[in-house]
Image (cartoon, rainbow, N blue to C red):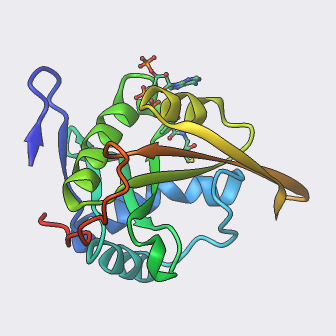
Amino acid sequence: MKRAPADGWLLRDAIPDTDAAACLDVYAPFIRDTSVSFEEIVPTIEKFRDRMRANIATHPWLVLVVDGQVVGYAYGSQHRSRASYRWATDVTVYVDPAHRGVGAGRRLYGALLERLRHQGFQVACAGITLPNDASVGLHRAMGFEAVGIYRRIGWKAGTWHDVMWMQLELVPPTDAAPPEPLRPSG
Ligand SMILES: CC(C)(COP(=O)(O)OP(=O)(O)OC[C@H]1O[C@@H](n2cnc3c(N)ncnc32)[C@H](O)[C@@H]1OP(=O)(O)O)[C@@H](O)C(=O)NCCC(=O)NCCS
Protein backbone atom coordinates (compact mmCIF):
# COMPACT_ATOMS: atom_id res chain seq x y z
CA MET A 1 0.00 0.00 0.00
CA LYS A 2 1.47 3.37 -1.01
CA ARG A 3 0.40 6.88 -0.18
CA ALA A 4 1.39 9.71 -2.47
CA PRO A 5 3.30 12.19 -0.33
CA ALA A 6 1.88 15.48 -1.52
CA ASP A 7 -1.63 15.08 -2.77
CA GLY A 8 -3.23 12.49 -0.52
CA TRP A 9 -3.86 10.00 -3.31
CA LEU A 10 -3.94 6.43 -2.12
CA LEU A 11 -2.88 3.66 -4.46
CA ARG A 12 -3.69 0.17 -3.26
CA ASP A 13 -4.66 -3.34 -4.29
CA ALA A 14 -8.32 -3.67 -5.14
CA ILE A 15 -10.51 -5.61 -2.72
CA PRO A 16 -13.34 -7.10 -4.80
CA ASP A 17 -15.94 -7.04 -2.02
CA THR A 18 -15.17 -3.41 -1.22
CA ASP A 19 -14.24 -1.95 -4.61
CA ALA A 20 -16.32 -3.75 -7.24
CA ALA A 21 -19.16 -1.21 -7.17
CA ALA A 22 -16.86 1.80 -7.43
CA CYS A 23 -14.77 0.23 -10.21
CA LEU A 24 -17.93 -0.65 -12.10
CA ASP A 25 -19.17 2.93 -11.67
CA VAL A 26 -15.99 4.15 -13.37
CA TYR A 27 -16.17 1.49 -16.07
CA ALA A 28 -19.87 1.32 -16.97
CA PRO A 29 -20.00 4.56 -19.02
CA PHE A 30 -17.32 3.15 -21.33
CA ILE A 31 -19.56 0.17 -22.04
CA ARG A 32 -22.75 2.21 -22.43
CA ASP A 33 -21.48 5.27 -24.28
CA THR A 34 -18.19 4.48 -26.04
CA SER A 35 -16.25 1.88 -27.96
CA VAL A 36 -13.28 2.09 -25.60
CA SER A 37 -14.63 -1.21 -24.24
CA PHE A 38 -16.06 -3.80 -26.61
CA GLU A 39 -18.43 -5.09 -23.91
CA GLU A 40 -21.99 -4.25 -24.87
CA ILE A 41 -23.94 -4.90 -21.69
CA VAL A 42 -22.95 -3.58 -18.29
CA PRO A 43 -22.29 -6.62 -16.07
CA THR A 44 -24.08 -7.00 -12.78
CA ILE A 45 -22.13 -6.06 -9.70
CA GLU A 46 -21.94 -9.75 -8.78
CA LYS A 47 -20.46 -10.71 -12.14
CA PHE A 48 -18.01 -7.84 -12.02
CA ARG A 49 -16.94 -8.81 -8.50
CA ASP A 50 -16.40 -12.41 -9.64
CA ARG A 51 -14.36 -11.12 -12.54
CA MET A 52 -12.18 -9.13 -10.16
CA ARG A 53 -11.76 -12.12 -7.84
CA ALA A 54 -10.70 -14.38 -10.71
CA ASN A 55 -8.34 -11.73 -12.03
CA ILE A 56 -6.48 -11.05 -8.79
CA ALA A 57 -5.64 -14.75 -8.45
CA THR A 58 -3.09 -14.27 -11.21
CA HIS A 59 -2.66 -10.57 -11.97
CA PRO A 60 -2.59 -7.30 -10.02
CA TRP A 61 -5.62 -4.97 -9.91
CA LEU A 62 -4.93 -1.56 -8.40
CA VAL A 63 -7.28 1.25 -7.45
CA LEU A 64 -6.56 4.93 -6.99
CA VAL A 65 -8.51 6.49 -4.14
CA VAL A 66 -9.02 10.23 -3.71
CA ASP A 67 -10.97 11.55 -0.73
CA GLY A 68 -12.14 8.03 0.02
CA GLN A 69 -13.49 7.49 -3.49
CA VAL A 70 -12.10 5.14 -6.15
CA VAL A 71 -11.42 7.43 -9.12
CA GLY A 72 -9.56 4.99 -11.32
CA TYR A 73 -8.21 1.51 -11.61
CA ALA A 74 -5.75 -0.51 -13.63
CA TYR A 75 -5.18 -4.20 -13.93
CA GLY A 76 -3.22 -6.86 -15.75
CA SER A 77 -4.94 -9.84 -17.34
CA GLN A 78 -4.10 -12.90 -19.39
CA HIS A 79 -3.10 -11.94 -22.92
CA ARG A 80 -4.04 -15.28 -24.49
CA SER A 81 -4.73 -18.68 -23.03
CA ARG A 82 -2.18 -20.83 -24.88
CA ALA A 83 0.70 -21.82 -22.60
CA SER A 84 3.51 -20.06 -24.43
CA TYR A 85 1.80 -16.71 -23.98
CA ARG A 86 2.01 -16.87 -20.19
CA TRP A 87 4.78 -14.26 -19.90
CA ALA A 88 2.62 -11.73 -21.75
CA THR A 89 0.00 -9.69 -19.92
CA ASP A 90 -2.67 -7.35 -21.17
CA VAL A 91 -3.05 -4.10 -19.28
CA THR A 92 -6.08 -1.85 -18.89
CA VAL A 93 -6.70 1.46 -17.16
CA TYR A 94 -9.79 3.57 -16.53
CA VAL A 95 -9.88 6.98 -14.88
CA ASP A 96 -13.03 8.88 -13.98
CA PRO A 97 -13.41 11.91 -16.30
CA ALA A 98 -13.29 14.35 -13.37
CA HIS A 99 -9.80 13.17 -12.47
CA ARG A 100 -8.13 12.97 -15.87
CA GLY A 101 -5.07 14.88 -16.99
CA VAL A 102 -3.51 15.21 -13.56
CA GLY A 103 -1.38 12.08 -13.50
CA ALA A 104 -3.84 9.43 -12.32
CA GLY A 105 -3.27 7.14 -15.30
CA ARG A 106 0.48 7.54 -15.04
CA ARG A 107 0.36 6.79 -11.32
CA LEU A 108 -1.78 3.69 -11.79
CA TYR A 109 0.29 2.35 -14.67
CA GLY A 110 3.61 3.10 -12.99
CA ALA A 111 2.63 0.93 -10.04
CA LEU A 112 0.91 -1.71 -12.17
CA LEU A 113 3.87 -2.19 -14.50
CA GLU A 114 6.23 -2.46 -11.53
CA ARG A 115 4.05 -5.17 -10.01
CA LEU A 116 3.84 -7.06 -13.30
CA ARG A 117 7.61 -6.84 -13.67
CA HIS A 118 8.04 -8.16 -10.14
CA GLN A 119 5.79 -11.14 -10.96
CA GLY A 120 8.00 -12.03 -13.90
CA PHE A 121 5.84 -11.01 -16.83
CA GLN A 122 8.03 -10.08 -19.78
CA VAL A 123 5.72 -8.10 -22.07
CA ALA A 124 2.73 -5.85 -21.45
CA CYS A 125 0.19 -5.49 -24.28
CA ALA A 126 -2.57 -2.93 -24.73
CA GLY A 127 -5.36 -3.04 -27.29
CA ILE A 128 -6.73 0.46 -27.91
CA THR A 129 -9.88 1.15 -29.92
CA LEU A 130 -9.05 4.02 -32.26
CA PRO A 131 -9.21 6.94 -32.05
CA ASN A 132 -8.15 7.39 -28.43
CA ASP A 133 -5.46 10.09 -28.18
CA ALA A 134 -5.40 9.98 -24.39
CA SER A 135 -4.81 6.24 -24.21
CA VAL A 136 -2.25 6.20 -27.02
CA GLY A 137 -0.56 9.19 -25.33
CA LEU A 138 -0.49 7.49 -21.94
CA HIS A 139 0.90 4.26 -23.35
CA ARG A 140 3.57 6.12 -25.31
CA ALA A 141 4.43 8.11 -22.19
CA MET A 142 4.92 4.82 -20.32
CA GLY A 143 7.27 3.50 -23.02
CA PHE A 144 4.87 1.36 -25.07
CA GLU A 145 5.45 1.08 -28.81
CA ALA A 146 2.81 0.55 -31.48
CA VAL A 147 3.04 -2.89 -33.06
CA GLY A 148 0.08 -2.88 -35.42
CA ILE A 149 -3.56 -2.15 -36.05
CA TYR A 150 -6.36 -4.66 -36.42
CA ARG A 151 -8.65 -3.08 -39.00
CA ARG A 152 -12.44 -3.18 -38.58
CA ILE A 153 -12.06 -5.76 -35.82
CA GLY A 154 -14.99 -4.77 -33.61
CA TRP A 155 -18.58 -3.72 -34.36
CA LYS A 156 -20.17 -1.47 -31.80
CA ALA A 157 -22.71 1.34 -31.83
CA GLY A 158 -23.45 0.86 -35.52
CA THR A 159 -19.92 1.02 -36.87
CA TRP A 160 -16.67 -0.91 -37.27
CA HIS A 161 -13.67 -0.05 -35.12
CA ASP A 162 -9.93 -0.44 -35.53
CA VAL A 163 -7.81 -1.55 -32.58
CA MET A 164 -4.18 -0.54 -32.19
CA TRP A 165 -1.95 -2.90 -30.24
CA MET A 166 0.92 -1.46 -28.26
CA GLN A 167 3.51 -3.36 -26.26
CA LEU A 168 6.18 -2.74 -23.66
CA GLU A 169 9.14 -4.97 -22.82
CA LEU A 170 8.92 -5.11 -19.03
CA VAL A 171 12.43 -6.51 -18.70
CA PRO A 172 15.46 -6.31 -20.97
CA PRO A 173 14.90 -8.97 -23.64
CA THR A 174 17.18 -12.03 -23.55
CA ASP A 175 17.08 -15.43 -25.22
CA ALA A 176 17.42 -17.24 -21.87
CA ALA A 177 14.46 -19.35 -20.72
CA PRO A 178 12.27 -17.09 -18.55
CA PRO A 179 11.39 -18.08 -14.99
CA GLU A 180 7.72 -18.93 -14.44
CA PRO A 181 5.57 -15.87 -13.61
CA LEU A 182 4.75 -15.62 -9.91
CA ARG A 183 1.34 -15.22 -8.31
CA PRO A 184 0.53 -11.68 -7.10
CA SER A 185 1.90 -11.07 -3.63
CA GLY A 186 -0.65 -8.36 -2.80
C1 LIG B 1 -6.30 7.09 -20.96
C2 LIG B 1 -6.49 7.59 -19.53
C3 LIG B 1 -6.41 6.39 -18.59
C4 LIG B 1 -5.34 8.56 -19.20
O1 LIG B 1 -5.44 8.85 -17.82
P1 LIG B 1 -5.04 10.28 -17.22
O2 LIG B 1 -5.07 10.16 -15.76
O3 LIG B 1 -5.88 11.34 -17.82
O4 LIG B 1 -3.55 10.43 -17.76
P2 LIG B 1 -2.37 11.20 -17.05
O5 LIG B 1 -2.85 12.52 -16.56
O6 LIG B 1 -1.71 10.32 -16.06
O7 LIG B 1 -1.41 11.47 -18.27
C5 LIG B 1 -0.25 10.66 -18.49
C6 LIG B 1 0.23 10.88 -19.91
O8 LIG B 1 -0.73 10.42 -20.83
C7 LIG B 1 -0.76 11.28 -21.97
N1 LIG B 1 -2.10 11.85 -22.10
C8 LIG B 1 -3.04 11.95 -21.14
N2 LIG B 1 -4.16 12.51 -21.66
C9 LIG B 1 -3.90 12.77 -22.95
C10 LIG B 1 -4.66 13.32 -24.01
N3 LIG B 1 -5.94 13.72 -23.81
N4 LIG B 1 -4.09 13.41 -25.22
C11 LIG B 1 -2.83 12.98 -25.44
N5 LIG B 1 -2.04 12.44 -24.46
C12 LIG B 1 -2.59 12.34 -23.24
C13 LIG B 1 0.25 12.35 -21.75
O9 LIG B 1 1.47 11.95 -22.39
C14 LIG B 1 0.44 12.34 -20.26
O10 LIG B 1 1.75 12.66 -19.94
P3 LIG B 1 2.04 14.06 -19.20
O11 LIG B 1 1.39 13.95 -17.87
O12 LIG B 1 3.52 14.09 -19.11
O13 LIG B 1 1.44 15.10 -20.06
C15 LIG B 1 -7.84 8.35 -19.35
O14 LIG B 1 -7.91 9.35 -20.32
C16 LIG B 1 -9.05 7.48 -19.46
O15 LIG B 1 -9.48 6.87 -18.46
N6 LIG B 1 -9.62 7.39 -20.66
C17 LIG B 1 -10.82 6.61 -20.88
C18 LIG B 1 -10.58 5.13 -20.69
C19 LIG B 1 -9.53 4.62 -21.62
O16 LIG B 1 -9.43 5.00 -22.76
N7 LIG B 1 -8.72 3.69 -21.09
C20 LIG B 1 -7.69 3.04 -21.86
C21 LIG B 1 -8.29 1.86 -22.53
S1 LIG B 1 -7.14 1.21 -23.76
Residue 9 appears in which quarter of the rendering? top left
- x and y, in percent, of residue 146 in the image: 62, 38
Q: Is residue 31 above or below residue 83?
A: above
Which residue is rendered at x = 70% and y = 50% of the image? Answer: 34
- Seen in the image, is 102 located left or right of residue 63? right
Q: Residue furthest front?
A: 175
- The answer to whether residue 51 is seen in the rendering is yes
Which residue is rendered at x = 33% and y = 42% of the image? Answer: 172
Which residue is rendered at x = 43% and y = 61% of the image? Answer: 89
Q: Nearer the viewer, residue 43 or 183?
A: 183
- x and y, in percent, of residue 95 in the image: 44, 42
- The answer to whether residue 156 is seen in the rendering is no
- x and y, in percent, of residue 112 in the image: 29, 48
Which quadrant is home to the C terminus? bottom left
- Seen in the image, is 35 located left or right of residue 2? right
Residue 101 appears in which quarter of the rendering? top left
Which residue is rendered at x = 20% and y = 38% of the image? Answer: 67
- x and y, in percent, of residue 4 in the image: 13, 30
